[in-house]
Amino acid sequence: MSIRPVRRMIQSKPTIEGAGVHLRRAFGFGETTDFDPFLLFDDFRNERPEDFLAGFPWHPHRGIETITYVLAGTVEHGDSLGNRGRLGAGDVQWMTAGRGILHQEMPQGDETGRMHGFQLWANLPSSLKMTAPRYQDVPGAEIPEIVDDDGTTVRVVCGEFWGRKGPVEGVAADPRYLDVWVPANTRKTLPVELDRHAFAYVFDGDGTFRSASEPFGVLTEKEVDGRDVVVRERAGNRSLVLFDSGDEVTVQAGERGIRFLLVSGRPLKEPVAWYGPIVMNTKAELQQAVNELRDGTFIRP
């Protein structure tokens, strides 16, 4: 067994999307080779309704899958195919845009005005870019939750883990999407297949993940009292930890425990051509999509 070293740690950055939604982006709209098959990860936690109620009005998608995981508040959604729905706390929506869809997502806060959730984009291989659109709306009650002897709790959204299988099926990248809680001061090792890219996104508590250089932690050189010393950086709220190769991830939870998403998937290793929410393999395919949006033929029966 080999523990995955930490390649780098990224602090998600403030950005504005949709009609003025304030959120944090950990990666996306750039070089995503290290995250392949994933393209973008947004953290849309917010406690100010004026910063998210404008939502994400009608916009197109093609060539990708979007995964929305809601922990507080609700998200109303609708699309050009007539689908309508509402995601609440603990629910997941896995949308395969395929050959094209127009949809909107409108967040609403809970009784205290709080909105809490995440959106991940997964790429589709060239053979499935133009597949038929599909939704998998999963109520939170259907997501299996495993509690280990030490109190570690894992919700299995997608993929198989510790003998349980998540409810989301038939996803091209064969991803594993886990919501993990490790209790305070607990050291935990979790399996990750060797042939997958993997990252963890911390959103509660803190802790250290094992590095190649030291038993635990992300190591950097900093000046302390006039001396260059090596210090461990803890992964805290809104930190994304990108792992190198290996078949295990080990975390040491801090005094308040640590909760994070652990996401992994087999890389597609295909060229990526971006045009906002449309992701194809070539510029010619992007131009075709733009032309179809202009002439009204983007949505196909």
Image (cartoon, grey):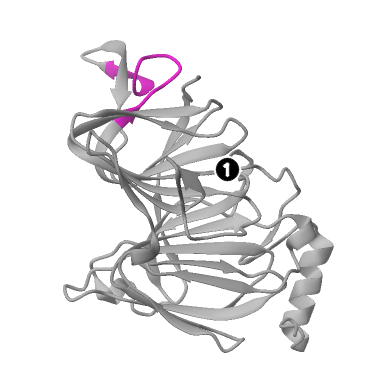
The magenta region covers: 208-223
Residue 90 pos. (x, y %): 33, 64
Q: Is residue 301 left or right of residue 150?
A: right
User: Which residue: 45% across, 42% down?
Assistant: 161
The image quadrant of residue 298 is bottom right
Residue 221 drawn in magenta: yes
The residue beneath circle 1 is 35
Which residue shows up at 74% across the image and 62% down it?
A: 128
Does 86 appear above or below 220?
below
**Relative to 218, is 301 on the left or the right?**
right
**Location of residue 132 in the rendering, given as x and y in whole percent from the top left corner:** 71, 73
Give the amino acid type for the residue marked by disc 1 in the picture. Answer: Phe
Q: Is residue 156 above or below residue 11?
A: below
Q: Residue at x 23, y 29 (%)?
A: 186
Give the residue furthest to the front: 163
Residue 213 within the segment the image draws in magenta: yes
Whether 73 is drawn above or below 298: the answer is: above
Res 114 → quadrant: bottom left
Query: In front: 21, or 128?
Result: 128
- Please, what secondary structure does the residue beneath circle 1 have? helix
Q: Which quarter of the rendered picture does the C terminus lie within?
A: bottom right
